[in-house]
Protein backbone atom coordinates (compact mmCIF):
# COMPACT_ATOMS: atom_id res chain seq x y z
CA UNK A 1 0.00 0.00 0.00
CA UNK A 2 1.43 3.39 -1.01
CA UNK A 3 2.31 5.91 1.75
CA UNK A 4 -0.18 8.41 0.34
CA UNK A 5 -3.11 6.00 0.55
CA UNK A 6 -2.02 4.87 4.01
CA UNK A 7 -1.85 8.48 5.19
CA UNK A 8 -5.28 9.24 3.71
CA UNK A 9 -6.87 6.26 5.47
CA UNK A 10 -5.27 7.24 8.81
CA UNK A 11 -6.62 10.77 8.38
CA UNK A 12 -10.05 9.39 7.52
CA UNK A 13 -10.02 7.24 10.64
CA UNK A 14 -9.04 10.21 12.79
CA UNK A 15 -11.61 12.43 11.08
CA UNK A 16 -14.44 9.94 11.55
CA UNK A 17 -13.71 9.47 15.25
CA UNK A 18 -12.54 12.96 16.13
CA UNK A 19 -15.27 14.77 14.20
CA UNK A 20 -17.97 12.65 15.73
CA UNK A 21 -16.65 13.50 19.14
CA UNK A 22 -16.31 17.16 18.28
CA UNK A 23 -19.84 17.34 16.91
CA UNK A 24 -21.22 15.59 19.94
CA UNK A 25 -19.21 17.80 22.26
CA UNK A 26 -21.48 20.61 21.23
CA UNK A 27 -24.50 18.67 22.54
CA UNK A 28 -25.10 20.01 26.04
CA UNK A 29 -25.47 17.59 28.93
CA UNK A 30 -28.20 19.84 30.17
CA UNK A 31 -31.48 20.60 28.41
CA UNK A 32 -31.82 23.69 26.22
CA UNK A 33 -32.93 26.79 28.01
CA UNK A 34 -36.67 27.33 27.74
CA UNK A 35 -39.02 29.58 29.59
CA UNK A 36 -40.63 27.89 32.59
CA UNK A 37 -42.93 29.38 35.16
CA UNK A 38 -41.33 30.36 38.43
CA UNK A 39 -42.31 28.11 41.32
CA UNK A 40 -41.54 27.47 44.95
CA UNK A 41 -38.01 26.35 45.89
CA UNK A 42 -37.82 22.64 46.79
CA UNK A 43 -37.37 21.55 50.38
CA UNK A 44 -34.28 19.49 49.66
CA UNK A 45 -31.31 19.77 47.36
CA UNK A 46 -32.32 19.94 43.71
CA UNK A 47 -30.37 18.82 40.61
CA UNK A 48 -27.66 21.21 39.52
CA UNK A 49 -29.37 22.47 36.36
CA UNK A 50 -30.35 25.86 35.02
CA UNK A 51 -33.90 26.57 33.86
CA UNK A 52 -35.49 23.19 34.51
CA UNK A 53 -34.04 23.08 38.02
CA UNK A 54 -36.90 25.26 39.19
CA UNK A 55 -39.73 23.04 40.50
CA UNK A 56 -42.84 23.03 38.34
CA UNK A 57 -46.18 22.01 39.79
CA UNK A 58 -46.24 20.45 43.25
CA UNK A 59 -42.90 20.69 45.08
CA UNK A 60 -40.72 17.64 44.47
CA UNK A 61 -37.01 17.23 45.28
CA UNK A 62 -36.45 15.68 41.80
CA UNK A 63 -38.63 18.20 39.94
CA UNK A 64 -41.12 15.55 38.81
CA UNK A 65 -44.13 17.84 39.07
CA UNK A 66 -44.56 18.15 35.24
CA UNK A 67 -43.86 15.83 32.30
CA UNK A 68 -41.14 18.13 31.02
CA UNK A 69 -39.39 18.46 34.37
CA UNK A 70 -39.60 14.72 35.08
CA UNK A 71 -38.13 13.69 31.72
CA UNK A 72 -35.42 16.28 31.98
CA UNK A 73 -34.45 15.09 35.43
CA UNK A 74 -34.23 11.48 34.20
CA UNK A 75 -31.92 12.37 31.31
CA UNK A 76 -29.65 14.57 33.48
CA UNK A 77 -29.23 11.77 36.00
CA UNK A 78 -28.71 9.09 33.31
CA UNK A 79 -26.14 11.18 31.40
CA UNK A 80 -24.25 11.68 34.66
CA UNK A 81 -24.23 7.90 35.19
CA UNK A 82 -26.38 8.23 38.33
CA UNK A 83 -28.74 5.38 37.49
CA UNK A 84 -29.89 4.99 41.13
CA UNK A 85 -31.35 8.47 40.93
CA UNK A 86 -32.55 7.94 37.35
CA UNK A 87 -34.57 4.91 38.55
CA UNK A 88 -36.63 7.33 40.68
CA UNK A 89 -38.23 8.57 37.44
CA UNK A 90 -39.53 5.12 36.44
CA UNK A 91 -42.84 3.71 37.67
CA UNK A 92 -41.71 0.31 39.00
CA UNK A 93 -44.85 -0.47 40.99
CA UNK A 94 -46.22 -3.05 38.54
CA UNK A 95 -42.97 -5.05 38.48
CA UNK A 96 -42.50 -8.05 40.77
CA UNK A 97 -40.58 -7.20 43.95
CA UNK A 98 -37.48 -9.06 42.76
CA UNK A 99 -37.55 -7.05 39.50
CA UNK A 100 -37.90 -3.67 41.21
CA UNK A 101 -34.33 -3.98 42.44
CA UNK A 102 -33.25 -3.80 38.78
CA UNK A 103 -34.43 -0.19 38.62
CA UNK A 104 -30.93 1.27 37.93
CA UNK A 105 -30.31 -1.34 35.20
CA UNK A 106 -33.70 -0.57 33.61
CA UNK A 107 -32.85 3.16 33.74
CA UNK A 108 -29.58 2.49 31.89
CA UNK A 109 -31.34 0.38 29.28
CA UNK A 110 -34.09 2.97 28.80
CA UNK A 111 -31.45 5.70 28.30
CA UNK A 112 -29.69 3.54 25.65
CA UNK A 113 -32.98 2.80 23.85
CA UNK A 114 -33.92 6.50 23.80
CA UNK A 115 -30.50 7.54 22.51
CA UNK A 116 -30.68 5.10 19.61
CA UNK A 117 -34.28 5.66 18.55
CA UNK A 118 -35.78 8.89 19.97
CA UNK A 119 -34.00 12.12 20.77
CA UNK A 120 -36.30 13.85 23.24
CA UNK A 121 -37.44 17.35 22.35
CA UNK A 122 -38.40 18.99 25.65
CA UNK A 123 -40.43 21.69 23.94
CA UNK A 124 -42.93 19.01 22.87
CA UNK A 125 -43.56 18.00 26.52
CA UNK A 126 -46.04 19.73 28.79
CA UNK A 127 -44.68 22.08 31.46
CA UNK A 128 -47.91 22.07 33.50
CA UNK A 129 -48.85 19.77 36.33
CA UNK A 130 -51.94 18.52 34.49
CA UNK A 131 -50.10 17.68 31.26
CA UNK A 132 -51.73 17.97 27.83
CA UNK A 133 -55.47 17.45 27.85
CA UNK A 134 -56.02 17.26 24.09
CA UNK A 135 -53.65 14.44 23.10
CA UNK A 136 -56.30 11.69 23.04
CA UNK A 137 -54.85 9.97 26.15
CA UNK A 138 -56.15 9.62 29.66
CA UNK A 139 -55.91 12.80 31.77
CA UNK A 140 -53.10 11.22 33.85
CA UNK A 141 -50.98 10.25 30.79
CA UNK A 142 -48.80 12.18 28.33
CA UNK A 143 -47.00 10.92 25.25
CA UNK A 144 -43.19 10.97 25.31
CA UNK A 145 -42.90 9.81 21.70
CA UNK A 146 -43.29 6.86 19.32
CA UNK A 147 -40.55 4.49 18.18
CA UNK A 148 -40.59 1.78 15.55
CA UNK A 149 -39.66 -1.78 16.55
CA UNK A 150 -39.62 -5.08 14.70
CA UNK A 151 -43.10 -5.83 16.05
CA UNK A 152 -44.53 -2.44 15.16
CA UNK A 153 -44.83 1.04 16.60
CA UNK A 154 -44.50 1.48 20.36
CA UNK A 155 -45.76 4.56 22.21
CA UNK A 156 -43.64 5.72 25.15
CA UNK A 157 -45.80 7.27 27.86
CA UNK A 158 -45.36 9.39 30.97
CA UNK A 159 -47.90 8.85 33.77
CA UNK A 160 -48.97 10.82 36.82
CA UNK A 161 -48.62 8.63 39.95
CA UNK A 162 -48.76 9.29 43.71
CA UNK A 163 -45.42 9.90 45.40
CA UNK A 164 -44.39 7.02 47.68
CA UNK A 165 -44.03 8.96 50.94
CA UNK A 166 -46.93 11.44 50.90
CA UNK A 167 -49.09 10.64 47.83
CA UNK A 168 -48.44 13.97 46.07
CA UNK A 169 -49.06 13.46 42.29
CA UNK A 170 -45.83 13.39 40.30
CA UNK A 171 -44.91 12.31 36.74
CA UNK A 172 -42.89 9.19 35.93
CA UNK A 173 -42.27 6.94 32.95
CA UNK A 174 -45.42 4.80 32.85
CA UNK A 175 -45.41 1.23 34.14
CA UNK A 176 -46.50 -0.04 30.69
CA UNK A 177 -43.46 1.58 29.11
CA UNK A 178 -41.18 0.29 31.90
CA UNK A 179 -42.42 -3.25 31.26
CA UNK A 180 -41.26 -2.99 27.63
CA UNK A 181 -37.79 -1.56 28.38
CA UNK A 182 -36.00 -4.98 28.19
CA UNK A 183 -37.69 -5.64 24.85
CA UNK A 184 -36.70 -2.22 23.49
CA UNK A 185 -33.14 -2.59 24.71
CA UNK A 186 -32.83 -6.03 23.15
CA UNK A 187 -33.26 -4.47 19.70
CA UNK A 188 -30.56 -1.81 20.15
CA UNK A 189 -28.30 -3.02 22.93
CA UNK A 190 -25.14 -5.13 22.61
CA UNK A 191 -26.38 -8.03 24.73
CA UNK A 192 -23.65 -10.36 23.48
CA UNK A 193 -20.96 -7.83 24.43
CA UNK A 194 -22.22 -7.41 27.98
CA UNK A 195 -20.98 -10.89 28.86
CA UNK A 196 -17.49 -10.12 27.51
CA UNK A 197 -16.75 -6.52 28.58
CA UNK A 198 -16.72 -4.99 32.06
CA UNK A 199 -19.70 -2.90 33.09
CA UNK A 200 -17.68 0.32 32.88
CA UNK A 201 -17.88 0.10 29.07
CA UNK A 202 -21.66 0.42 29.29
CA UNK A 203 -22.01 2.78 32.26
CA UNK A 204 -19.53 5.50 31.26
CA UNK A 205 -20.51 7.91 28.47
CA UNK A 206 -18.23 10.34 26.62
CA UNK A 207 -19.99 12.86 24.39
CA UNK A 208 -23.23 10.82 24.55
CA UNK A 209 -21.50 7.61 23.43
CA UNK A 210 -20.73 4.69 25.72
CA UNK A 211 -17.16 3.45 25.90
CA UNK A 212 -18.09 0.25 24.05
CA UNK A 213 -19.45 2.35 21.20
CA UNK A 214 -16.20 4.30 20.91
CA UNK A 215 -14.30 1.01 20.86
CA UNK A 216 -16.65 -0.42 18.25
CA UNK A 217 -16.31 2.70 16.07
CA UNK A 218 -12.53 2.34 16.10
CA UNK A 219 -12.77 -1.34 15.17
CA UNK A 220 -15.29 -0.67 12.38
CA UNK A 221 -13.16 2.15 10.92
CA UNK A 222 -10.02 -0.02 11.00
CA UNK A 223 -11.84 -2.99 9.46
CA UNK A 224 -13.34 -0.77 6.75
CA UNK A 225 -9.88 0.56 5.83
CA UNK A 226 -8.41 -2.96 5.63
CA UNK A 227 -11.31 -4.45 3.65
CA UNK A 228 -11.32 -1.49 1.23
CA UNK A 229 -7.62 -2.08 0.62
CA UNK A 230 -8.45 -5.60 -0.55
CA UNK A 231 -11.66 -4.80 -2.42
CA UNK A 232 -10.62 -1.62 -4.26
CA UNK A 233 -7.65 -3.02 -6.18
CA UNK A 234 -9.32 -6.37 -6.87
CA UNK A 235 -12.60 -4.74 -7.88
CA UNK A 236 -10.94 -2.29 -10.28
CA UNK A 237 -8.95 -5.06 -11.96
CA UNK A 238 -12.00 -7.32 -12.20
CA UNK A 239 -14.10 -4.53 -13.69
CA UNK A 240 -11.36 -3.77 -16.18
CA UNK A 241 -11.16 -7.43 -17.13
CA UNK A 242 -14.92 -7.55 -17.71
CA UNK A 243 -14.88 -4.36 -19.77
CA UNK A 244 -12.04 -5.61 -21.97
CA UNK A 245 -13.45 -9.18 -21.93
CA UNK A 246 -10.00 -10.47 -21.17
CA UNK A 247 -8.80 -9.63 -24.70
CA UNK A 248 -6.17 -7.15 -23.60
CA UNK A 249 -4.23 -6.34 -20.48
CA UNK A 250 -5.65 -3.61 -18.27
CA UNK A 251 -3.57 -0.46 -18.42
CA UNK A 252 -1.84 -0.15 -14.99
CA UNK A 253 -2.35 3.62 -15.15
CA UNK A 254 -6.09 3.03 -14.80
CA UNK A 255 -5.56 1.08 -11.59
CA UNK A 256 -3.26 3.74 -10.14
CA UNK A 257 -5.57 6.61 -11.02
CA UNK A 258 -8.87 5.04 -9.98
CA UNK A 259 -7.80 2.97 -6.98
CA UNK A 260 -7.41 5.90 -4.56
CA UNK A 261 -10.89 7.45 -4.84
CA UNK A 262 -12.53 4.03 -5.07
CA UNK A 263 -10.77 2.97 -1.88
CA UNK A 264 -11.93 6.11 -0.08
CA UNK A 265 -15.54 5.57 -1.21
CA UNK A 266 -15.47 1.89 -0.20
CA UNK A 267 -13.98 2.77 3.20
CA UNK A 268 -16.71 5.32 3.89
CA UNK A 269 -19.45 2.96 2.65
CA UNK A 270 -18.24 0.07 4.83
CA UNK A 271 -17.87 2.33 7.87
CA UNK A 272 -21.39 3.69 7.31
CA UNK A 273 -22.75 0.16 7.04
CA UNK A 274 -20.90 -0.98 10.14
CA UNK A 275 -21.87 1.76 12.57
CA UNK A 276 -25.56 1.32 11.71
CA UNK A 277 -25.54 -1.68 14.05
CA UNK A 278 -23.98 0.17 17.02
CA UNK A 279 -27.17 1.89 18.23
CA UNK A 280 -25.46 5.28 18.36
CA UNK A 281 -27.18 8.25 19.88
CA UNK A 282 -29.21 10.19 17.34
CA UNK A 283 -26.89 13.28 17.36
CA UNK A 284 -23.84 11.05 16.96
CA UNK A 285 -25.42 9.14 14.10
CA UNK A 286 -26.44 12.40 12.38
CA UNK A 287 -22.92 13.82 12.79
CA UNK A 288 -21.36 10.70 11.30
CA UNK A 289 -23.80 10.67 8.40
CA UNK A 290 -22.89 14.30 7.67
CA UNK A 291 -19.17 13.42 7.65
CA UNK A 292 -19.85 10.41 5.43
CA UNK A 293 -21.74 12.50 2.90
CA UNK A 294 -18.90 15.02 2.79
CA UNK A 295 -16.32 12.28 2.26
CA UNK A 296 -18.42 10.67 -0.47
CA UNK A 297 -18.66 14.03 -2.26
CA UNK A 298 -14.86 14.32 -2.00
CA UNK A 299 -14.44 10.76 -3.32
CA UNK A 300 -16.81 11.44 -6.22
CA UNK A 301 -14.97 14.65 -7.14
CA UNK A 302 -11.61 12.87 -6.82
CA UNK A 303 -12.82 10.01 -9.04
CA UNK A 304 -14.23 12.49 -11.58
CA UNK A 305 -10.84 14.22 -11.79
CA UNK A 306 -9.09 10.90 -12.38
CA UNK A 307 -11.63 9.85 -15.03
CA UNK A 308 -11.09 13.17 -16.81
CA UNK A 309 -7.34 12.49 -16.82
CA UNK A 310 -7.96 8.99 -18.22
CA UNK A 311 -10.23 10.36 -20.94
CA UNK A 312 -7.60 12.96 -21.85
CA UNK A 313 -4.91 10.26 -22.15
CA UNK A 314 -7.20 8.08 -24.26
CA UNK A 315 -8.17 10.92 -26.61
CA UNK A 316 -4.54 12.00 -27.00
CA UNK A 317 -3.43 8.48 -27.92
CA UNK A 318 -6.33 8.12 -30.35
CA UNK A 319 -5.55 11.46 -32.00
CA UNK A 320 -1.89 10.48 -32.40
CA UNK A 321 -2.84 7.14 -33.97
CA UNK A 322 -5.14 8.83 -36.49
CA UNK A 323 -2.79 11.72 -37.17
CA UNK A 324 -5.40 14.21 -35.94
CA UNK A 325 -2.86 16.42 -34.20
CA UNK A 326 -5.19 19.44 -34.18
CA UNK A 327 -7.14 17.91 -31.29
CA UNK A 328 -4.15 17.65 -28.93
CA UNK A 329 -3.82 21.38 -28.06
CA UNK A 330 -7.42 21.55 -26.86
CA UNK A 331 -7.25 18.47 -24.60
CA UNK A 332 -5.50 20.12 -21.66
CA UNK A 333 -7.71 23.26 -21.45
CA UNK A 334 -10.75 21.06 -22.06
CA UNK A 335 -9.76 18.80 -19.15
CA UNK A 336 -9.22 21.81 -16.89
CA UNK A 337 -12.59 23.25 -17.82
CA UNK A 338 -14.28 19.92 -17.03
CA UNK A 339 -12.51 19.80 -13.65
CA UNK A 340 -13.68 23.33 -12.82
CA UNK A 341 -17.25 22.27 -13.60
CA UNK A 342 -16.95 19.24 -11.29
CA UNK A 343 -15.41 21.42 -8.56
CA UNK A 344 -18.40 23.75 -8.71
CA UNK A 345 -20.78 20.80 -8.57
CA UNK A 346 -18.83 19.35 -5.62
CA UNK A 347 -18.87 22.68 -3.75
CA UNK A 348 -22.63 22.93 -4.24
CA UNK A 349 -22.99 19.35 -2.99
CA UNK A 350 -20.94 20.13 0.14
CA UNK A 351 -22.91 23.31 0.80
CA UNK A 352 -26.16 21.39 0.41
CA UNK A 353 -24.91 18.75 2.86
CA UNK A 354 -24.05 21.48 5.37
CA UNK A 355 -27.57 22.90 5.08
CA UNK A 356 -26.79 25.96 2.98
CA UNK A 357 -29.59 27.21 0.75
CA UNK A 358 -28.38 26.01 -2.66
CA UNK A 359 -30.98 28.06 -4.53
CA UNK A 360 -29.65 31.28 -3.05
CA UNK A 361 -26.05 30.24 -3.74
CA UNK A 362 -26.86 29.36 -7.34
CA UNK A 363 -28.71 32.65 -7.72
CA UNK A 364 -25.64 34.51 -6.44
CA UNK A 365 -23.39 32.62 -8.82
CA UNK A 366 -25.88 33.34 -11.60
CA UNK A 367 -25.63 37.10 -11.05
CA UNK A 368 -21.84 36.95 -11.20
CA UNK A 369 -21.99 34.59 -14.15
CA UNK A 370 -24.19 37.02 -16.07
CA UNK A 371 -21.65 39.79 -15.59
CA UNK A 372 -18.78 37.56 -16.74
CA UNK A 373 -20.81 36.25 -19.68
CA UNK A 374 -21.67 39.76 -20.86
CA UNK A 375 -18.03 40.83 -20.64
CA UNK A 376 -16.72 37.77 -22.49
CA UNK A 377 -19.68 36.99 -24.71
CA UNK A 378 -17.76 36.66 -27.97
CA UNK A 379 -14.89 34.74 -26.37
CA UNK A 380 -17.29 32.27 -24.76
CA UNK A 381 -19.19 31.95 -28.04
CA UNK A 382 -15.98 31.06 -29.87
CA UNK A 383 -14.90 28.70 -27.07
CA UNK A 384 -18.15 26.77 -27.14
CA UNK A 385 -18.08 26.84 -30.93
CA UNK A 386 -14.66 25.17 -30.81
CA UNK A 387 -15.95 22.58 -28.34
CA UNK A 388 -18.84 21.90 -30.72
CA UNK A 389 -16.46 21.43 -33.64
CA UNK A 390 -14.32 18.98 -31.66
CA UNK A 391 -17.37 17.07 -30.42
CA UNK A 392 -19.36 16.96 -33.66
CA UNK A 393 -16.32 16.87 -36.01
CA UNK A 394 -18.01 18.04 -39.24
CA UNK A 395 -14.51 18.70 -40.60
CA UNK A 396 -11.01 17.75 -39.47
CA UNK A 397 -7.53 19.01 -40.18
CA UNK A 398 -6.65 18.21 -43.80
CA UNK A 399 -10.24 17.96 -45.08
CA UNK A 400 -11.23 19.69 -48.32
CA UNK A 401 -14.68 21.19 -47.86
CA UNK A 402 -17.14 23.87 -48.86
CA UNK A 403 -18.26 26.56 -46.42
CA UNK A 404 -20.86 29.03 -47.60
CA UNK A 405 -19.90 29.78 -51.20
CA UNK A 406 -16.17 29.17 -50.62
CA UNK A 407 -14.01 26.04 -50.68
CA UNK A 408 -10.74 25.26 -48.95
CA UNK A 409 -8.70 22.89 -46.82
CA UNK A 410 -8.74 22.89 -42.98
CA UNK A 411 -5.28 23.65 -41.62
CA UNK A 412 -5.96 24.13 -37.89
CA UNK A 413 -8.89 24.12 -35.46
CA UNK A 414 -8.08 26.20 -32.40
CA UNK A 415 -10.00 27.29 -29.32
CA UNK A 416 -10.88 30.67 -30.82
CA UNK A 417 -10.79 30.24 -34.60
CA UNK A 418 -10.38 27.79 -37.48
CA UNK A 419 -7.79 28.40 -40.21
CA UNK A 420 -8.70 27.47 -43.80
CA UNK A 421 -6.42 27.55 -46.85
CA UNK A 422 -8.38 28.58 -49.92
CA UNK A 423 -7.85 27.66 -53.58
CA UNK A 424 -5.98 30.96 -53.97
CA UNK A 425 -3.49 29.62 -51.37
CA UNK A 426 -4.46 32.30 -48.86
CA UNK A 427 -5.32 31.47 -45.23
CA UNK A 428 -8.67 32.60 -43.81
CA UNK A 429 -9.26 32.64 -40.02
CA UNK A 430 -12.92 32.12 -39.16
CA UNK A 431 -14.13 32.56 -35.51
CA UNK A 432 -15.43 29.26 -34.20
CA UNK A 433 -18.74 30.76 -33.11
CA UNK A 434 -19.42 31.80 -36.71
CA UNK A 435 -17.80 28.72 -38.28
CA UNK A 436 -19.91 26.26 -36.24
CA UNK A 437 -23.10 27.86 -37.61
CA UNK A 438 -22.07 27.68 -41.27
CA UNK A 439 -23.38 24.92 -43.58
CA UNK A 440 -20.28 22.74 -44.10
CA UNK A 441 -20.02 20.32 -47.03
CA UNK A 442 -17.12 17.95 -46.42
CA UNK A 443 -15.75 16.55 -49.67
CA UNK A 444 -13.10 14.49 -47.88
CA UNK A 445 -15.59 11.98 -46.42
CA UNK A 446 -17.16 11.00 -49.75
CA UNK A 447 -17.04 7.25 -50.42
CA UNK A 448 -18.13 7.68 -54.07
CA UNK A 449 -18.33 10.57 -56.49
CA UNK A 450 -21.19 11.31 -58.84
CA UNK A 451 -20.70 11.30 -62.59
CA UNK A 452 -23.51 13.14 -64.31
CA UNK A 453 -23.76 14.75 -67.71
CA UNK A 454 -26.28 15.49 -70.46
CA UNK A 455 -25.28 14.39 -73.98
CA UNK A 456 -27.06 16.04 -76.91
CA UNK A 457 -26.92 14.23 -80.31
CA UNK A 458 -28.12 15.53 -83.61
CA UNK A 459 -31.77 15.33 -84.63
CA UNK A 460 -30.78 13.45 -87.82
CA UNK A 461 -30.03 10.42 -85.62
CA UNK A 462 -32.43 7.59 -86.43
CA UNK A 463 -34.21 5.66 -83.65
CA UNK A 464 -32.08 2.57 -84.25
CA UNK A 465 -28.91 4.62 -84.19
CA UNK A 466 -30.06 6.07 -80.92
CA UNK A 467 -30.77 2.61 -79.56
CA UNK A 468 -27.30 1.48 -80.57
CA UNK A 469 -25.72 4.52 -78.96
CA UNK A 470 -27.65 4.03 -75.70
CA UNK A 471 -26.57 0.38 -75.59
CA UNK A 472 -22.91 1.29 -76.18
CA UNK A 473 -22.90 4.01 -73.54
CA UNK A 474 -24.48 1.66 -70.99
CA UNK A 475 -21.99 -1.00 -71.91
CA UNK A 476 -19.11 1.38 -71.27
CA UNK A 477 -20.42 2.22 -67.81
CA UNK A 478 -21.07 -1.42 -66.97
CA UNK A 479 -17.69 -2.55 -68.25
CA UNK A 480 -15.63 0.13 -66.53
CA UNK A 481 -14.02 -1.28 -63.33
CA UNK A 482 -14.18 2.05 -61.44
CA UNK A 483 -17.91 2.67 -62.00
CA UNK A 484 -20.38 1.11 -59.57
CA UNK A 485 -23.06 -1.02 -61.19
CA UNK A 486 -26.00 0.36 -59.26
CA UNK A 487 -26.94 2.98 -60.25
CA UNK A 488 -25.26 3.25 -63.67
CA UNK A 489 -27.77 4.42 -66.23
CA UNK A 490 -27.99 6.16 -69.60
CA UNK A 491 -31.47 7.20 -70.67
CA UNK A 492 -33.06 9.13 -73.53
CA UNK A 493 -34.73 11.87 -71.50
CA UNK A 494 -36.08 14.44 -74.00
CA UNK A 495 -36.11 16.48 -77.14
CA UNK A 496 -34.04 19.57 -76.70
CA UNK A 497 -34.14 22.78 -78.72
CA UNK A 498 -31.47 21.47 -81.04
CA UNK A 499 -30.61 17.96 -79.76
CA UNK A 500 -31.84 14.60 -78.61
CA UNK A 501 -30.88 14.57 -74.93
CA UNK A 502 -29.30 11.53 -73.22
CA UNK A 503 -28.79 11.67 -69.42
CA UNK A 504 -25.79 9.83 -67.95
CA UNK A 505 -25.88 9.10 -64.19
CA UNK A 506 -23.36 6.91 -62.35
CA UNK A 507 -21.01 6.82 -59.37
CA UNK A 508 -17.22 6.53 -59.58
CA UNK A 509 -15.87 4.21 -56.90
CA UNK A 510 -13.41 6.72 -55.40
CA UNK A 511 -13.37 9.57 -52.93
CA UNK A 512 -10.29 11.26 -54.36
CA UNK A 513 -11.03 14.23 -56.59
CA UNK A 514 -7.91 13.86 -58.73
CA UNK A 515 -8.62 10.22 -59.43
CA UNK A 516 -12.24 11.04 -60.22
CA UNK A 517 -11.13 13.52 -62.86
CA UNK A 518 -9.05 10.79 -64.49
CA UNK A 519 -11.97 8.33 -64.48
CA UNK A 520 -14.44 10.87 -65.85
CA UNK A 521 -12.05 11.92 -68.57
CA UNK A 522 -11.57 8.30 -69.69
CA UNK A 523 -15.32 7.68 -69.79
CA UNK A 524 -16.04 10.87 -71.75
CA UNK A 525 -13.42 9.91 -74.35
CA UNK A 526 -14.99 6.47 -74.70
CA UNK A 527 -18.41 8.17 -75.08
CA UNK A 528 -17.05 10.21 -77.99
CA UNK A 529 -15.85 7.02 -79.66
CA UNK A 530 -19.29 5.43 -79.13
CA UNK A 531 -21.04 8.43 -80.70
CA UNK A 532 -18.78 8.12 -83.73
CA UNK A 533 -19.43 4.35 -83.92
CA UNK A 534 -23.17 5.02 -84.02
CA UNK A 535 -22.71 7.21 -87.08
CA UNK A 536 -24.14 10.31 -85.45
CA UNK A 537 -22.64 13.40 -83.86
CA UNK A 538 -22.96 15.84 -81.00
CA UNK A 539 -25.48 18.58 -81.47
CA UNK A 540 -24.56 22.20 -81.00
CA UNK A 541 -26.55 25.43 -81.21
CA UNK A 542 -26.69 26.42 -84.87
CA UNK A 543 -28.97 27.36 -87.74
CA UNK A 544 -28.90 24.66 -90.42
CA UNK A 545 -30.11 25.20 -93.99
CA UNK A 546 -30.95 21.85 -95.60
CA UNK A 547 -30.16 22.05 -99.37
CA UNK A 548 -29.45 18.41 -99.93
CA UNK A 549 -27.83 15.53 -98.24
CA UNK A 550 -25.95 16.59 -95.08
CA UNK A 551 -22.46 15.24 -95.59
CA UNK A 552 -21.76 15.61 -91.87
CA UNK A 553 -23.27 12.16 -91.26
CA UNK A 554 -21.45 8.90 -91.95
CA UNK A 555 -23.74 6.79 -94.14
CA UNK A 556 -21.66 3.63 -93.76
CA UNK A 557 -21.56 3.86 -89.96
CA UNK A 558 -25.28 4.58 -89.91
CA UNK A 559 -26.03 1.47 -91.93
CA UNK A 560 -23.77 -0.66 -89.72
CA UNK A 561 -25.44 0.67 -86.53
CA UNK A 562 -28.89 -0.03 -87.95
CA UNK A 563 -27.76 -3.52 -89.02
CA UNK A 564 -26.50 -4.25 -85.53
CA UNK A 565 -29.81 -3.19 -83.99
CA UNK A 566 -31.65 -5.39 -86.54
CA UNK A 567 -29.41 -8.32 -85.55
CA UNK A 568 -30.21 -7.75 -81.87
CA UNK A 569 -33.88 -7.86 -82.73
CA UNK A 570 -33.53 -11.12 -84.68
CA UNK A 571 -31.55 -12.77 -81.87
CA UNK A 572 -33.96 -11.52 -79.19
CA UNK A 573 -31.12 -9.69 -77.46
CA UNK A 574 -32.25 -6.09 -77.84
CA UNK A 575 -30.75 -4.27 -74.79
CA UNK A 576 -33.91 -2.34 -73.97
CA UNK A 577 -35.13 -1.42 -71.46
CA UNK A 578 -31.99 -3.01 -69.90
CA UNK A 579 -29.17 -5.46 -70.59
CA UNK A 580 -29.69 -9.18 -70.19
CA UNK A 581 -27.86 -10.94 -67.32
CA UNK A 582 -25.74 -12.89 -69.81
CA UNK A 583 -24.57 -9.74 -71.53
CA UNK A 584 -23.77 -8.11 -68.21
CA UNK A 585 -21.56 -11.04 -67.20
CA UNK A 586 -19.73 -10.96 -70.54
CA UNK A 587 -18.83 -7.28 -70.56
CA UNK A 588 -18.45 -6.51 -66.84
CA UNK A 589 -14.95 -5.07 -66.13
CA UNK A 590 -13.82 -5.95 -69.69
CA UNK A 591 -12.42 -2.50 -70.50
CA UNK A 592 -8.75 -1.86 -69.88
CA UNK A 593 -7.96 0.50 -67.04
CA UNK A 594 -5.88 2.59 -67.17
CA UNK A 595 -6.53 3.03 -70.92
CA UNK A 596 -3.93 1.62 -73.34
CA UNK A 597 -1.02 4.00 -73.84
CA UNK A 598 -1.47 5.83 -70.54
CA UNK A 599 1.11 5.63 -67.69
CA UNK A 600 0.73 2.40 -65.79
CA UNK A 601 -1.15 0.61 -68.61
CA UNK A 602 0.21 -2.73 -70.02
CA UNK A 603 2.39 -2.09 -73.11
CA UNK A 604 2.43 -5.54 -74.63
CA UNK A 605 0.57 -8.80 -74.57
CA UNK A 606 3.35 -10.29 -72.43
CA UNK A 607 2.88 -7.60 -69.81
CA UNK A 608 -0.85 -8.27 -69.74
Image (spheres, rainbow, N blue to C red):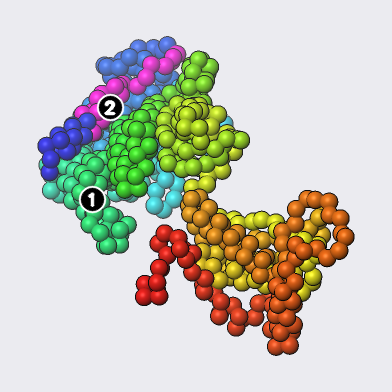
Looking at the rendering, the stretch of residues picked out in magenta corresponds to 16-37
**In the foreground, 563 or 548:** 548
Under circle 1, the secondary element is loop
Side (left or right) of 289 relative to 68:
left
Question: In this rendering, which labeled residue sits more in front, label 1 or label 2?
Answer: 1
Q: Residue furthest bottom?
A: 571
Is residue 576 visible in this depiction of the protein? Answer: no
Side (left or right) of 514 relative to 270:
right
Question: How busy is the neighbourhood of tag 2: few (under 14 within 10 Å), some, or many (20 plus)?
Answer: many
Q: Which numbered marker is on residue 251?
A: 1
- Relative image position of residue 570 (x, y in whole percent): 73, 88
Tell whether position 447 is magenta.
no
Side (left or right) of 307 relative to 202:
right
Q: Which numbered marker is on residue 24?
A: 2
- Relative image position of residue 156 (x, y in whole percent): 42, 39
Tell whether position 17 is magenta.
yes
Amino acid sequence: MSPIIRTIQILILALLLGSAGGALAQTPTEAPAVETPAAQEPATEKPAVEDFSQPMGPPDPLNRGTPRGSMYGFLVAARAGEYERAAEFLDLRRLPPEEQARGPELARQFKAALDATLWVDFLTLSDTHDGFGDDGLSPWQDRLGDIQTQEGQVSLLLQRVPREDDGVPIWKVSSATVARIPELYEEVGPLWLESWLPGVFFDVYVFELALWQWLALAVVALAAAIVSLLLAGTGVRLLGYLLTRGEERLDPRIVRLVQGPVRLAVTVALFALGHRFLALAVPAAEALRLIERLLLVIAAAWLSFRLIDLASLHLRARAERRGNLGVIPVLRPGARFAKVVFVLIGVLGVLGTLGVNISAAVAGLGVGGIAVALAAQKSLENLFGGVTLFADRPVQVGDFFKYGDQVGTVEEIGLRSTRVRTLDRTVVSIPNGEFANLPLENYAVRDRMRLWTLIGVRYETTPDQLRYLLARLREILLAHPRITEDPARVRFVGFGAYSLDLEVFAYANTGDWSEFLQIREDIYLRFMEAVAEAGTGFAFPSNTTYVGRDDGLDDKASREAEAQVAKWREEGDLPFPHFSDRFRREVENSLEWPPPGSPGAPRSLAER
